[in-house]
Image (spheres, grey):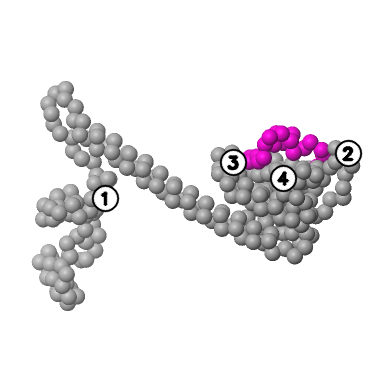
Amino acid sequence: MPEREIPKDSPDTVNGDAAARDSRSGGTSLGALAQPIAADQVEAYLRRHPDFLAERPDLLDVLTPPARARGDGVVDLQQAMVERLRHKLSDVTQLRDDLVATGRSNLAIQARVHEAILALLRAHSFEEFVETITTDLAVILDLDVVTIGVEQAENGQAWKPVAGVYCLKAGTIDAVLGRAGSMLLRDDIAGDPAVFDGAAGLVRSDALIRLGIGKNAPPALLALGSRQAGAFHAGQGTELLNFLSQVLEETFRAWLHLPGDG
């Protein structure tokens, strides 16, 4: 809607002019200014301000240009081309906005992962390190549960689990990830009690990551769970999760005095 012409004078002049106009129009109140603007008023305004659209080129994106009369059987391709360009511009603008939003989200996730790694490195004992993984990481990474699963020996001998660290049956990790698989992201699932224990009922989306702690160490699994479906999904980037898992592997080896043979 075009702007109304308002003289750039002093308040007294404006008020005086308004009063004079009201007087000449038979006492019309200022409320009349709120009435809808007629098409002829818009036309008159544009004729008095021929540079209006030139100064506001973005308005051309929402205006419909007139079709040219070319005679019977002749199609005006110019209007079709303009509409096509408008759609392309809209698509490019949407893509730009999506890229900006994705970039901001990635930066936020990156900052969370960096904070999580610093928390792991601040641990003063192996017990504090494990507790940081199973308690603090969930808060830092904005998740609902983080656990570690360690497979029992192939001979069936199990070990006594600690808080947040659970004993898995031998072969569980290969069965879930595949023998060569290192990570699995699932967007809409029911949490596995064997992995998430009592918090399994909360989990709707998870990331399961193999941890190669050492050649002589039992297979281990880092499990990240969220109550939000779609928090993890197969199409998302995994670079930061891979980096986090590598830091965990190295730190586990350091605390357990294992060689770095993965």
Give the image location of residue 114, x and y in percent. Answer: 60, 58
Q: Is residue 47 left or right of residue 139?
A: left
Q: Which residue is mark 1?
A: 58
Give the image location of residue 24, x and y in percent. Answer: 10, 66
**How many angstroms separate mark 1 from mark 4 (CA)?**
58 Å
Mark 4 is surrounded, within 10 Å at the Cα level, by few (under 14), some (14 to 19) or many (20 or more) other residues, namely: some
**How many angstroms separate mark 3 from mark 2 (CA)?**
34 Å
**How many angstroms separate mark 2 from mark 1 (CA)?**
71 Å
Mark 2 is surrounded, within 10 Å at the Cα level, by few (under 14), some (14 to 19) or many (20 or more) other residues, namely: few
Is 153 or 67 nearer to us in this picture?
153
Q: Nearer the viewer, mark 2 or mark 1?
A: 2
Is 202 or 241 nearer to us in this picture?
241
The residue at the point 55 percent across, 44 percent down is 237
User: What secondary structure is marked by label 4?
Assistant: loop
Q: Nearer the viewer, mark 3 or mark 2?
A: 2
Q: Which residue is mark 4?
A: 262
Question: Image quarter for residue 136?
Answer: bottom right
Q: Reply above or below: 154 against 16.
A: above
User: Hey, what amino acid is under mark 3?
Assistant: His
**Which residue lies most toward the top here?**
73
User: Hey, what amino acid is under mark 2?
Assistant: Gly
Q: Which residue is mark 2?
A: 156
Q: Earlier in the sequence, mark 1 or mark 4?
A: 1
Is 205 or 105 nearer to us in this picture?
105
The residue at the point 36 percent across, 46 percent down is 93
> Where residue 233 is drawn, which disc sits there?
3
Q: Nearer the viewer, mark 1 or mark 3?
A: 3
